[in-house]
Image (cartoon, grey):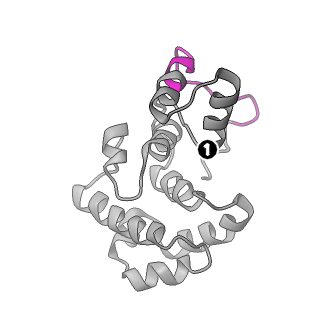
Amino acid sequence: MRDPYRIWLAEIMLQQTQVAAVVPYFERFLARFPDVGALAAATEDEVLRLWSGLGYYARGRNLRNAARLISSRGSFPDTLEGLQALPGVGRSTAAAIAIFAFGHRAAILDGNAKRVLARCFGIEGERAQWDLAGKLLPARACRPLPGCEGLHRAA
């Protein structure tokens, strides 16, 4: 299993933000909040101070609120439903965490994937796109490509 806390943090930070912009924030967050308990214990002001510059401040507030839920529960949710129940975690983000942290088989349907489905398959409408994305998944969970095995461990 890979670290769900780091994967969750990266996925939330990467919503609406480019990777190059996120890296220094991610590193500062991990230095100050190395685990979900540390983030749960932080004040909202402290979290938002470190978030400052990433924009969409609801993401920072949701991170702290979700960390408090996870901490009170005693473990990180490991199902799509459990992940999606966290504040600020939608269907695609829950799928990304489930795939990268727990090895689940799930579709990730971001804006780019939706455009591909619309253009290549003529599928409009989110429900139809999710249905098609699920059908297009391979029969089993994918393994990392050779040489890429360690990429998500650091995330």
| Residue shown at 52% from the left, 42% from the top | 96
| Residue 109 percent coordinates (x, y) | 55, 37
Q: Residue at x 62, y 71 (%)?
A: 25
Whole-percent x, y for residue 152 in the image: 62, 45
Which residue is denoted by mark 1 in the rendering? 111
- Judged left or right of residue 102, residue 117 is right
Residue 43 vertical position relative to residue 54 in the rendered view, above or below: below
The question of residue 139 being in magenta is answered with yes
Q: Pinpoint residue 112: horizontal percent, then vertical percent.
A: 66, 41
Helix, strand or loop at disc 1? helix
Q: Is 123 left or right of 19, judged from the image as shown? A: left
Magenta span? 133-148
Query: In front: 127, or 151?
Result: 127
| View extreme (left): residue | 72
In the picture, residue 119 is in which quadrant?
top right
Q: Is residue 110 left or right of residue 89?
A: right
**Residue 19 position by quadrant:** bottom right
Q: Looking at the image, which residue is at 70% across and 24% down? A: 120
Q: Position of residue 92 (x, y in %)?
A: 49, 42
Please count the marks in the image: 1
User: Is residue 131 or residue 153 the one in the foreground?
Assistant: 131
Q: Is residue 79 visible?
A: no
Q: Is residue 16 magenta?
A: no
Q: Residues within 10 Å of mark 1 (few under 14, many from 20)?
A: few
Residue 5 at least partly seen: yes
Q: Decide which of 31, 51 is in the foreground and name it.
A: 51
What residue is at 70 percent from the left and 60 percent from the top? 18
Residue 125's place in the image compared with 15, above or below, is: above
Q: Main secondary structure of the magenta part?
A: loop
Mark 1 belongs to which amino acid? Answer: Gly
